[in-house]
Image (cartoon, coloured by chain):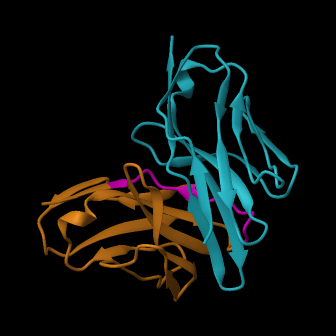
Chain colours: A orange, B cyan
């Protein structure tokens, strides 16, 4: 089954404790991205990657890091999480960077930073 | 920059009522347009898309027409069901030489009452 898998689905942690949210897709997609969803703000893009070893900042990259060492994986790293990063996070992928390609989303990761 | 505006709701309808969710956009070029649906506890799923002016996207009884002259992509359904209760996101995508710009609206929550 074609899917985007995120882990964990839920995480409660404390300020400053490094965490990683994993994202994996099995569709051989080139393009992957991370979003955060906050009430009234919709989805905002954090980082995206057009292919292996190619990443770039989205609209709200501060406080986040990503890596793309393999085509299928695109982890999101919070080196020193803060309470304002409490949010619902989605990983997405698409076949390539063409504008007519829809994105496929994971089920989301709810992070609470205390 | 690119942006998407949609009615935020919540929208509450009775079963079998007619649905319209307005969406307008601003973009520098010729974007592709999408509607995504998010059911409780899940990620976003592509509902329909249109890639050029006057295209009509349709799926599961939902329709939307790409109107370049009014920069709009309104979502409609003739007869909603309780199972249509969800959050609906309008989005656009523009591909550039250096990557893909995917922008979401804030989402519209729809509740359908039996």
Identify the image quadrant of the C terminus of chain A. bottom left
At which x and y percent is residue B50?
78, 52
Q: Is residue A47 visible?
A: yes
Q: Main secondary structure of the magenta part?
A: loop
At which x and y percent is residue B68?
82, 55
Residue at 14% in and 62% down: A13
Give the vertical position of A68 relative to B35 (above or below). below
Magenta span covers which residues? Answer: A98-109
Taking the view exactly as shown, the residue that stands out farthest to the top is: B114
Taking the view exactly as shown, the residue that stands out farthest to the bottom is: A53
Tell how many labels.
0
Residue at 14% in and 73% down: A17
Is residue A78 rendered to the left or right of residue B81? Answer: left
Give the vertical position of B114 relative to A20 (above or below). above
Give the vertical position of A57 relative to B88 (above or below). below
Residue at 50% in and 41% down: B8
Q: Is residue A99 magenta?
A: yes
Taking the view exactly as shown, the residue that stands out farthest to the right is: B54
What is the quadrant of residue B65 in the picture?
A: top right
Residue placed most toward the observer, A86 or A51? A86
Q: Is residue A27 visible?
A: no
């Amino acid at each position: 089954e074609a899917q985007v898998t995120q882990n964990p689905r839920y995480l409660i942690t404390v300020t400053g404790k490094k965490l990683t949210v994993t994202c994996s897709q099995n569709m051989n997609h080139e393009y992957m991205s991370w979003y955060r969803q906050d009430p009234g703000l919709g989805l905002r893009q954090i980082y995206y990657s057009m292919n292996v070893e190619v990443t770039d900042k989205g609209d709200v990259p501060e406080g986040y890091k990503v890596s793309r060492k393999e085509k299928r994986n695109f982890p999101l790293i919070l080196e020193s999480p803060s309470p304002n990063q409490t949010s619902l996070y989605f990983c997405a992928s698409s076949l390539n960077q063409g504008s007519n390609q829809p994105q496929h989303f994971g089920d989301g990761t709810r992070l609470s930073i205390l | 920059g690119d942006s998407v505006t949609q009615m935020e709701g919540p929208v509450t309808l009775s079963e079998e009522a007619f649905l319209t969710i307005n969406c307008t956009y601003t973009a520098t070029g010729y974007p592709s347009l999408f509607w995504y649906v998010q059911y409780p506890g899940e990620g976003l799923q592509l509902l329909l898309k249109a890639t050029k002016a006057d295209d009509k996207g349709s799926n599961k009884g939902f329709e939307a027409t790409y109107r370049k002259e009014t920069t709009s992509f309104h979502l409609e359904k003739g007869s909603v069901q309780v199972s249509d209760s969800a959050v609906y996101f309008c989005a656009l995508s523009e591909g550039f030489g250096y990557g893909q710009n995917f922008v979401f609206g804030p989402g519209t929550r729809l509740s359908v009452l039996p």
